Structure formats: C-alpha cells, structure tokens
Amino acid sequence: MSTTTFVLKGGTLVDGSISDILIDGGVITRIEKSLTDEHATVIDATDSIVLPGLVDLHTHLRQPGREDAETVASASRAGAKGGFTALSAMANTSPVADNAGVVEQVYRLGQEAGLLDVFPIGAVTEGLKGETLSEIGAMADSIARVRVFSDDGMCVFDPLVMRRALEYIKKFDGVIAQHAQEPRLTIGSQMNEGEMSARLGLRGWPAIAEEAIIARDVLLTDHVQSRLHVCHVTTAGGVEIIRWAKARGINVSAEVTPHHLLLTDDLASSYDPIFKVNPPLRTEKDVHALREALADGTIDIVATDHAPHTMESKECEWQEASFGMLGLETAISIVQKTMVDNGLLTWQGVAERMSHSPARIGGYEHQGQKISVGSVANVTLINPLKSWTVDRDLVQSRSRNTPFHGYVLPGVVTHTFYKGKLTLENGVNV
C-alpha cells in the first residue's frame, strides 16, 4: 500500500462548501474548485461529506492474549471500514498492558498492520486490580508515548489510588480515563436497574453506581488539579454531574458510545446476550439526556467501546454471557441517525466530536487535524444520502457480536485515507 496522488472531486467540507482536494505525498496540498493533476487518481466525492479521519479513544483490540476474538490487524481493518484513522487500545489484554513491554508490543503491531494509528492505553494499576499503580512513567517514556491510562472494564475504586494516579500523570500532561462503576453496588448486576430488570428477574445495575464514582472523581480531579476523562457515560444523572463540574472549571472530559445513543434496556426483554453490555443499556430518558449532552458539548466525544467477543462468549444464557458489543464499523452511521438526521449536530459538530476532540484529549499528534492545506491527509468520505444494511457475517472484525445486525443505517463510508494512503475504496478494504 503506497502513497499516491489523489484528487477528491466535488466533496462537501464540514463548513458546507464544495471543493476539490489534492492529496500528494501524504499531505493535503491544495483545496480549490476545478482542480486538475494529470498524475493524480481522481475520486468522485460528489454527495460525500469530507471529514477528518475519525479517532476512537476507546477500543478493545484484545491482542495480546485473546486473538480468537480480535487482533490488532483485524481491528485495524474494521476501523478503516468505519472511517477511522486512529484507535486507542484499551489495557485489559492478557497480559495486561501495565508495563512498557506490552504497550510497545501493541504499538508495533499497529505499525505492522499499517492501516491506521494504534495508540496503546496503559493500565492505571497492576493487573487492573485497583491496588498498586502500574509502571505509568515507563509507559509514558516508551516508544508508544502513552498519555492515556485506564483500567477500563474495572473501576479504580480506591480513592487514594485514584488520587495518586491523578497526581502522577500531571508530570507529562496525561489523563486518567475512568470506568465509573462502584463495584459494591453492582455485584452480580446484569442490566439497568429499573422496571425492566424487575420484570425480567435480572439483577439491576443502578445508575447511582456510575454517578457516585463520577462525582467522587471530579472532586478529586479538582483537588489535585489534574485531568479526568469519564468513559462511556450512560445516565442522565452522570450528565448533570459532568455539566456541574465543567461549570466550575474542573478539567474533565467525557464520552458516549453510539449504542448508548440509540439502544435502551427494553431490548433485554429478548434475553438475547447481544444486548448485554457494560455499562448497561439505560432508559429512553437517559438516551435523550445523552444526545442533548453530546449536542451541547457537556459530553465531548463519541467513542465506540468496541468490545469483540467469540461466539461462545455471547451465544449462551444471559447470565453467563460476556459484556460487550462491536462498534467500529457502525459508529458514524449511528451518529448520523441519532444526531445529524435529528438536527442535533452538524457535520462540523461530528468532526469535532469524532476527530478533533478525541485526538486532543489523547494527545495524538498528526490526528484530528482540520481539512486544510498542509495538514496530514487523514481523511474520511461518507455519503450521507446512501443507506446500508448491517450484516454480522460481513464485518471485518474477527467477532460477530454486533447489536445492529439487520438494521438499515444511513451514511456509507466510501473512502478512508491514512496519511495519504487509501485504506478503504468504494466501501471495500484495500
């Protein structure tokens, strides 16, 4: 896969203007109308929105240790198919990414795949046990240059450990990405606590278990003057706490997943484990609060929480099934359906929440740049006028656990460029 010269003809930029774009040597060199270059490959971008390459701050790549569910290479293909040019690899691998050796391994695997940037996220604590801080400094100084640390999948539940982590990452402007789940309030929990859980006889997962940790951690962050990122916010109450914290000037950012923008806990009535996820699907009221918060900037970004699992892990009884859903290949379409088509976000707002802001929060150089002359050619073309039907048997991931199988979704990603290299052409991986 070599860098080539491309002219994107007639694409619509996020400000609404229509122009041609010349990509040469991995960089955007010209943006103007009626561009010609006899050496360039011409791509018809008519009816397409030209977005900066999408950046995911929350992805489970499973490698090392769970290559039966996903690998860095297969996730990279799925990411390219979804319009992503950067993925952030969560630390809950086997072995856990709690030291420089493992994060460097993941980083190199991403380079070998060569389809997008893979930025490893380091564990906050050794073995994700929440007891002893991991080798944070060594990971920050490694070739992977880790700046985001998370025990995602587990909560850093001890307030003293969380305080020390927040203090430590100040040395290099890092950020702690917290999985907000009070473990003592969620022992054996299977789905959102409410009317549906009572009816189904499944142990409920109360909203307060998320909100209590968010409240504690924004106060800790304010106390030590550090940076906090709240993973996968799901409750209306959590939104209000984050809104309050931002109003006070506390350095907190937050994310929402595509599935929490669309799906509700009513789907658990099927007892189909495809809808079992951590944190759980919530109520319609929560969904509307999340959409409003993403629109007004209280929630900063969309992150997929792409969580692949083998068939054996999902095709079983609900109580025994693993938590998690695929998300990379459907993310931008879900955002169009829930936010753009409803008038809650413009495409410029999508670019901010799915490219610029996640790259800024993660400290990712050469990602999240605006489409402008001189910027690195990380570019995604999406045709918002077309629709497609999700088919779990056609996904690029090694796993098949998409909750959107059979859904007809708007917005087709047609082309993805990573540093000027074409990684997706006419919807097909290159």
Image (cartoon, rainbow, N blue to C red):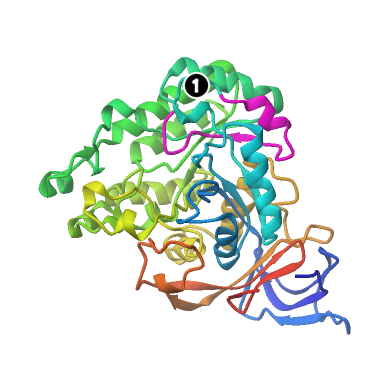
Tell me where residue 351 appears, x and y as whole percent.
Answer: 61, 57
Give the residue number, with chain letter if any, for mark 1: 162
In the image: residue 213, left or right of residue 412:
left
Quadrant for the C terminus in the image: bottom right
Residue drawn at point x = 34 percent, y = 28 percent: 182
**Which residue corresponds to the image point at 45% horizontal and 67% vertical from the top-left?**
341
Q: Position of residue 200 (x, y in %)?
A: 13, 49
User: Would you place residue 335 above or below residue 224 in this image?
Assistant: below
Q: Is residue 340 visible?
A: no
Instruction: Say whether residue 147 is left or right of residue 156.
Output: right
Residue 273: quarter of image: bottom left
Image label count: 1
Amino acid carrying mark 1 in the image: Met
Q: Look at the image and give the residue range highlighted in magenta.
A: 134-155
Residue 65 visible in the displayed image: yes
**Residue in the picture at 59% in, 47% down:** 88
Q: Quadrant of residue 85?
A: bottom right
Q: Tell me: 382 left or right of 200.
A: right
Q: Secondary structure at mark 1?
A: helix
Q: Residues within 10 Å of mark 1 (few under 14, many from 20)?
A: many
Quadrant into which the N terminus falls: bottom right
Give percent across and percent down for residue 422.
71, 71
Location of residue 51 with respect to 394 vertically, above or below = above
Q: Position of residue 108 (x, y in %)?
A: 69, 49
Q: Nearer the viewer, residue 353 or 15?
A: 353
Within the magenta stretch, is there residue 159?
no
